[in-house]
Every structure is written in structure tokens, then in C-alpha cells.
Image (cartoon, rainbow, N blue to C red):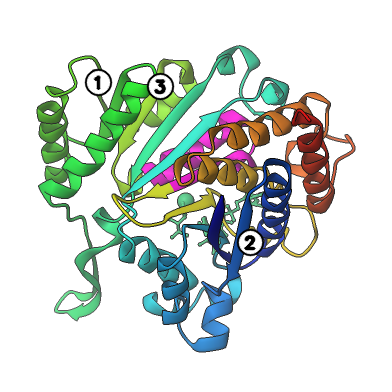
């Protein structure tokens, strides 16, 4: 199989983790007889510095022409004081919107070897395996009007939470489809006791739910969901929620897996390339030090192989290699216990590739 992959390393630790992910893909290609062709492009702060815009037209074009997109992370203190459209994050949001990547899949898996890396008690984490589906192209992130203005009462500011019924419906449908392939239990998270947008969300979930009688639908208010996620995460299988709630709950859920450096994501549309990126950001505090955990990006590569290329076996080979590396006690710094030895980003990349080679039957 020959596939074109757009690689957008971005800022901070983005280039460090994507470089290792590209090496991993090359190794998968070698092992399984595929050719992955990479086209590198700028996004975020590095694009702002070079071109004055966080998503140059050329980058968008490269993405549109690719079979899938791999992204590191964007942002950093250097660009934190610019106006909204001159921020690195605006480039990522524009890319998600332009490609209509409305369904953001964020799986949270607890690798048994990592139960001690989490701040939660091991018995709370047993068997945790959940999928958060975050709406990604609507809500507070994109609603108009937004911004500041002078009023009689002084400076005022507005962000708008806007959803059309069609936007709500398509992501819910996707969530029901995914829940159907899992344990057929879908928790829809909202704030229907306060927000009109949530009330329409809940009504729509009930309506669509009638088409999926085999899937048990439950509604949960977001504040309770935040608490339940750490009280008893095992009660969740598939979770669906709007953009901002999903952003916050997925970072919270990352701690179940031991580190934000373990959480991958896939952003999918109804047609066109999917975008694969770790859930974490550019981690300015550790950037440039070869300390980042590349496993979230590796797991995002596994999602790419599965969702965009239908290469289930190859995806599993990556997951298995990671599983074994962790079982054998290898850790990056974020996963290591106090005083425990840890691997650098490049060493972890090397280790996973080595285990991948052993995995594949000759
Ligand atoms: P962050 O996710 O970058 O970092 C939070 C904490 O987790 C930091 O202590 C960091 O060192 C640690 N961490 C994150 N990823 C790690 C990894 N792979 N290995 C080891 N440790 C890791 O969040 P932040 O500090 O709030 O944001 C920093 C910048 O990143 C901001 O500019 C923000 O806008 C941006 N950001 C970008 C994305 C993205 O590109 N998708 C996502 C989140 C944040
Ligand atoms: C994420 C990030 C982004 C978001 C930012 C960088 C725009 O936090 O991918 O989770 O809020 O969606
Ligand atoms: Mn986030």
C-alpha cells in the first residue's frame, strides 16, 4: 500500500514526538511492505514566524491532498500575547474547521503496567477502557459573535456557544455507531440544567437513540461527569460531548492512563483525510530537552493505520510493542517513579521500533 501523509510537527515538543512517529511509520512500512510518503508542512507558531499566519494556504493544500495528517502540537509562550487570529492555536482550529473534522476520538486506555504511574488508586483503574468522542468544529470555539468591545459599563467580552441541530446530530450518530462496536453503553455529557444548547443536545440524543435501541443511552451533567471520571471511571465505556466539555474531560481522563503523554486522538470527517495528534500540547516546560513521551503520538499513528488505512494488524503491532515496552519497565520521565531511571524521547522511539521488529512473524 502507498499512502501520502502530511506531517505537521508544529511547536515545542511537537517536532520531537513527530520525528519519532515518522521513524515508527517507516519501520511499520518496512515490516509490512507499505510505502508511506511524508510531506512536511508548517503550522502554529513556527508558521506564524515564517509567514505571518498560523495556517499557511500551502499547508492546508498539502493536508487536503494527503491520505492522512499527523500533527505534533502548537503553541508556546513566545506567541501567547498576540491577537486571537495571530495565535498558533488558531491555525489548528482553522485546519479542523476547514477539513470538517467534527468527530474527535480520544480513547483512554489504562495499560496494566502503568497503574502505578497514575495518581489514582490501582483498584479504581482496573479494566478502564473508555472512548471520549468530542465534537470538534462547533460550540464556544467557533461561535460568532466573539471578542471585546467598549460599552457604557466599560470593557465587555463575548464568546458564543452556537450549534446547529445538524452539527449535534452528526456527532451523536458517530458516537452511537462507535458505542455499538464497543460495549453498547453511551454516556452523553451536557449541562442541560442550565444551557439551551445542552437541552437541544439532550433532545437530539434521545431522538437519535431510538434508531439505536441496542445501545444504552445515559445522560450525565458535566460537573457530575468530571467527578464520576475519577470516582469510578470503570462505569464509562463511550462518552460523547460538546467541544469545550470534551477538551476539559479528556485532559482529566488522561490521568487515568498515568500521563497526558499517553493519550492519542483521531479527528474524523465524513470524507477526506483524518487528522491524528496526541491530546497533549507543546509542553514548553520540557521542550528541546528530549524528555517528551512520544507514546501518545505513536498511539495516534496506530489510530491512523486503523481508521484511515484500514490496517488493523499493523495498528495492533504498534499497540502490542508499546504494551511490551511498558511491561518490561521502560518509562519516559513523566511515567517514571521518583528516582527511577527513564528513557529519553529518542530512546523510547528506538525501543518501540526494536520491539516492533520482534513482534512481526517472519
Ligand atoms: P501541555 O499539554 O503542553 O502540558 C501540560 C503538562 O503536561 C506539562 O507539564 C507538560 O510538560 C506535560 N506534558 C504534555 N505532554 C507531554 C509529553 N508528551 N510527555 C511528557 N510530559 C508531557 O499543556 P499546557 O502547558 O497547558 O499548554 C502548552 C501550550 O500547548 C499552549 O500554548 C497550548 O495552547 C498548547 N496546546 C496545544 C495543543 C495541541 O496542539 N493540540 C493541545 C494542548 C495545548
Ligand atoms: C486540544 C487543545 C486545543 C483545543 C487547543 C490548542 C486549541 O487543547 O487539542 O485539546 O482546545 O482543542
Ligand atoms: Mn486540550
State the extent of the magenta-drawn residues as a range: 246-266
Seen at 61% across and 64% down, the residue is: 38
Image quarter for ligand 1 = bottom right
**Circles 1 and 2: CB distance less than 8 Å?**
no
**Residue 209 in picture, x, y percent from top left:** 16, 25
Cβ at disc 1 under 8 Å from ligand 2 = no
Is residue 243 in sight in this rendering?
Answer: yes
Earlier-in-chain disc, 2 versus 3: 2
Cβ at disc 2 under 8 Å from ligand 1 = yes
Q: CA distance from mark 1 to mark 2?
A: 37 Å
Mark 1, other Cα within 10 Å: few <14 / some 14–19 / many ≥20: some
| Residue 262 vertical placement versus 326 (above, below) | below
Q: Nearer the viewer, residue 163 or 175?
A: 175
340 left or right, relative to 308:
right
Q: Quadrant of residue 260?
A: top right
223 left or right, relative to 70:
left
**Residue 253 in picture, x, y percent from top left:** 50, 34
**Residue 78 in picture, x, y percent from top left:** 60, 76
Mark 3, other Cα within 10 Å: few <14 / some 14–19 / many ≥20: many
Seen at 80% across and 37% down, the residue is: 357
What residue is disc 1 on?
Answer: 218
Most prominent secondary structure in the magenta stretch?
helix
What residue is disc 3 on?
Answer: 237
Is residue 331 in sight in this rendering?
Answer: no
Asked which secondary structure carries label 1, the reply is: strand
Asked which secondary structure carries label 3, the reply is: loop
**Circles 2 and 3: CB distance less than 8 Å?**
no
Mark count: 3
Q: Which residue is situated farthest in the bottom direction here?
A: 51
Q: CA distance from mark 2 to mark 3?
A: 30 Å
Amino acid at each position: 500500500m502507498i499512502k501520502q501523509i502530511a506531517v505537521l510537527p508544529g511547536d515545542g515538543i511537537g517536532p520531537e514526538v513527530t520525528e519519532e512517529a515518522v521513524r515508527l511509520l517507516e519501520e511499520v512500512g518496512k515490516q509490512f511492505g507499505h510505502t508511506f510518503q511524508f510531506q512536511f508542512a508548517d503550522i502554529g507558531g513556527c508558521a506564524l514566524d515564517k509567514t505571518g499566519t498560523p495556517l499557511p494556504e500551502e499547508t492546508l493544500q498539502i493536508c487536503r491532498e494527503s491520505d492522512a495528517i499527523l500533527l505534533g502540537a502548537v503553541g508556546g509562550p513566545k506567541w501567547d500575547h498576540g491577537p486571537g487570529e495571530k495565535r498558533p492555536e488558531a491555525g489548528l482550529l482553522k485546519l479542523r474547521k476547514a477539513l470538517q473534522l467534527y468527530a474527535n476520538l480520544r480513547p483512554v486506555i489504562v495499560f496494566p503496567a502503568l497503574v502505578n504511574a497514575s495518581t489514582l488508586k490501582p483498584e479504581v483503574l482496573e479494566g478502564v477502557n473508555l472512548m471520549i468522542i468530542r465534537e470538534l468544529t462547533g460550540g464556544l470555539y467557533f461561535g460568532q459573535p466573539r471578542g471585546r468591545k467598549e460599552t457604557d459599563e466599560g470593557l465587555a467580552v463575548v464568546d458564543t456557544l452556537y450549534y446547529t441541530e445538524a452539527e449535534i446530530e452528526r456527532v451523536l450518530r458517530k458516537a452511537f455507531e462507535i458505542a455499538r462496536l464497543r460495549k453498547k453503553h453511551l454516556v452523553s455529557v451536557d449541562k442541560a440544567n442550565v444551557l439551551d444548547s445542552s437541552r437541544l443536545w439532550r433532545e437530539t440524543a434521545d431522538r437519535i437513540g431510538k434508531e439505536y435501541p441496542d445501545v444504552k443511552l445515559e445522560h450525565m451533567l458535566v460537573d457530575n461527569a468530571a467527578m464520576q471520571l475519577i470516582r469510578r471511571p470503570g462505569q464509562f465505556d463511550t462518552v460523547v460531548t460538546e467541544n469545550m466539555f470534551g477538551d476539559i474531560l479528556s485532559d482529566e481522563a488522561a490521568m487515568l492512563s498515568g500521563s497526558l503523554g499517553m493519550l492519542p486522538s483521531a479527528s474524523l470527517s465524513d470524507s477526506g483525510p483524518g487528522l491524528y495528534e496526541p491530546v497533549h500540547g507543546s509542553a514548553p516546560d520540557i521542550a528541546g530537552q528530549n524528555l517528551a513521551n512520544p507514546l501518545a503520538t505513536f498511539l495516534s499513528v496506530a489510530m491512523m493505520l486503523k481508521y484511515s488505512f484500514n490496517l488493523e494488524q499493523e495498528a495492533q503491532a504498534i499497540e502490542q510493542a508499546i504494551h511490551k515496552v511498558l511491561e518490561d519497565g521502560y518509562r519516559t520521565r513523566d511515567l517514571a517513579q521518583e528516582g527511577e531511571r527513564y528513557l529519553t524521547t529518542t530512546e523510547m522511539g528506538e525501543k518501540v521500533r526494536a520491539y516492533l521488529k520482534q513482534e512481526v512473524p517472519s
